[in-house]
Amino acid sequence: MDQQEIKQEIRRLLDERNAIMLAHNYQRDEIQEVADITGDSLGLARAGADTDKDVIIFCGVHFMAESSAILSPEKKVILPRLDAGCPMADMVTAEGLREMKKKHSKAMVVTYVNSSAAVKAESDICCTSANAIKVASSVEADELILVPDRNLGRWIEAHTDKTCHHWTGWCPTHDRLKTEELAQARKDNPDAVVMAHPECRPDILEMADEILSTSGMIDFAGKSSASRFIVATEMGLLYRLRKENPGKEFILPSRSLICPNMKLTSLEDVLVSLQTLEPQVTVDPDTAAKAKSALDRMLAIPRD
Ligand code: 13P
Ligand code: SF4
């Protein structure tokens, strides 16, 4: 089968299986093209929870499919590539977090969704890059434990007067963007607006005009009167930015902004997962119930 035939067969099977295909903004172009909904972590978590389909084909990384499985236990959640993980999510364990909670017993735990179900189960509330500051402000405590991204944590800390304790995890893709690379991109494109993802290092965020989640960047670029943008996040986002803004120009400041895990899923993998309804992502009911309350608290925060 050629690519076009595979895409048609995917669409046919989605119908037959009463399934929805969700794709993160960093997925390969052809995956985004065929998906029902493309979005950021928050948008996809909401889409998975809101759908009335029986099956969710989740094209993203493991923690995202796991969140969907927690929010929709009655649905079958399929991750076409079970090996698509998130190295940052793997940098914190439930046991490590329990130790940190013992040291800061008055603090409430705000956990980035880029984390395992077991870690979410030890947390008071989850956040994504789209709502992190709002979530942190909504928490009743004066002290916060921020897990696992130190960069997102520092950004939250700069926008709150709460005492913050940080876990030292990071995203290998965003963390390797260097200030020299961004400075060069700015020098080459002095008229461009710099949008950066909060997973970038603090010195990069200081150089940015706008700090946004992936879907936040899409909204901002669409509404902005500017016509050129430097995009400090994973390269997959350029597909939608370019498609939705044909008259505007988007520049990647570094060729290293690629998340290998987000690029694992191919059209063939999606096809096989629809034929077999495997591999399914499940979470044990005890862990899921605890993790769900942290996710539900986040989702209860009103949208802007
Ligand atoms: P968003 O929630 O902004 O889509 O980010 C998820 C992610 O994994 C970023 O690296
Ligand atoms: Fe994880 Fe970074 Fe890849 Fe996002 S871009 S999935 S945080 S490794």
Image (tube, grey):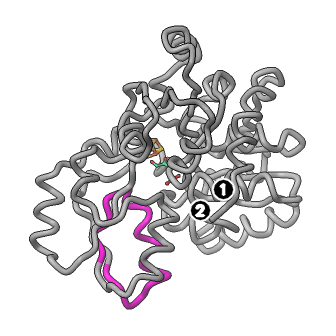
Residue located 76% across and 44% down the image: 77
Inspect the magenta stretch and tell me whether residue 237 lies in it.
yes
Quadrant in the rendering for residue 123: top right
Q: CA distance from mark 1 to mark 2?
A: 6 Å
Q: Position of residue 63 (x, y in %)?
A: 60, 38
Q: Position of residue 140 (x, y in %)?
A: 63, 35
Q: Earlier in the sequence, mark 1 or mark 2?
A: 2
Badge 1 element: helix
Residue located 73% across and 36% down the image: 281
Residue located 41% across and 47% down the image: 159
Badge 2 element: strand
Range covered by the magenta-colored residues: 229-249
> Label 1 sits on what residue type?
Leu
Q: Is mark 1 within 8 Å of ligand 1?
A: yes
Q: Position of residue 232 (x, y in %)?
A: 31, 59
Q: What residue is disc 1 on?
A: 44
Which of 4 and 288 lies nearest the eye of the viewer?
Answer: 288
Q: What residue is disc 2 on?
A: 39
Q: List the single residue furthest toward the bottom.
A: 247
